[in-house]
Image (tube, rainbow, N blue to C red):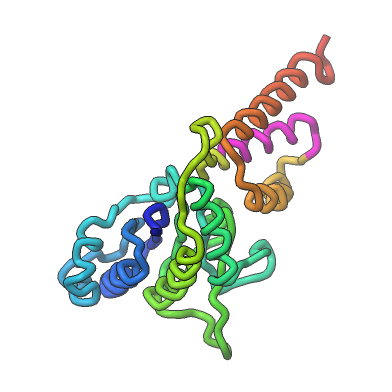
Amino acid sequence: MLDDLAVILFRPKYPENIGSTARACLNMGVSNLIIVDPLDFDMDRAYPLATASAKHLLENARVVETLAEAIEGFTAVYGTTARTGGWRKGVKTPETLAVSVGERLRAGGRVAIVFGPENIGLTNEETSICTGLLTIPTSGEKTSLNLSQAVVIVLYECFKKSLDTPFVPGGPPDERPTTVTEHEILFNNLQDTLLVIDYLKDKSADYWMLPVRRLFAKIDLRRNEFNILMGICRQIQWYVRTYGPGKK
């Protein structure tokens, strides 16, 4: 049911948490576990927490060195955070995230949810490449949860939502959902275009592109639409280089 949903553990510290996460994935029907640059991936310590039932998920987990490698091929990536405000706007709860995940999966996309290191979470730089962010509301001053607890809460909402309407991929190949990697290519091209026409300034470009990122996060951008926007950017840049100020 959630074959195209993945859990990404970014630099987890404790193998026991990796094992518990594997069990949580199994409980909620998620078989795709990706681990990025773990501090200590000791199978002997992870196995007991995974239990015999989720042993295969642990053994088949994909281990990569960078977050960029982990998210390649996914059409939407949601990062978890305990910190909100500032740049971290429009943060979803697990329940509202499940709605977005369901929409993406039903449209034929592949979705990943990223959980950061247990002690510090994800940085602003790491969350900037995410389609959106989510937080788990808690009571009192203690806002952080055990890693596997956070995973099972989020996946439970996604699993529950998947029971409402089955996810049936579809649509022509040229109208497939764009990947997060393609989003980054488009953002960079669009930023270069806005710099060329002097709409943005170098020092503030990244900051002013944040609302653009949030806008695209709300849109299920298809590959043919991606091609159109990329073509517009290329044409604008060509025109400025050819006929812009100082050109004959």
Please identify the residue farthest to the bottom as the structure is shown: 140
Q: Is residue 220 left or right of residue 179?
A: right
The residue drawn where x is 29% and y is 53% is 62
Percent of width and height locating residue 96: 59, 68
Nearer-the-camera pick, 206 or 162: 162
Q: Which residues are magenta?
A: 184-199
Q: Is residue 75 above or below residue 113?
A: above
Percent of width and height locating residue 190: 68, 36
Q: Is residue 65 left or right of residue 166?
A: left
**Split into 4 quadrants, where in the image is the C terminus?**
top right
Q: Is residue 121 left or right of residue 52?
A: right
Q: Is residue 16 above or below residue 86?
A: below
The residue drawn where x is 67% and y is 53% is 214
Q: Is residue 234 above or below residue 137?
A: above
> Magenta-highlighted stretch: main secondary structure?
helix
The residue drawn where x is 44% and y is 67% is 159
Quarter of the rendering containing residue 156: bottom left
Q: Is residue 22 visible?
A: yes
The residue drawn where x is 20% and y is 74% is 51
Residue 192 among those drawn in magenta: yes
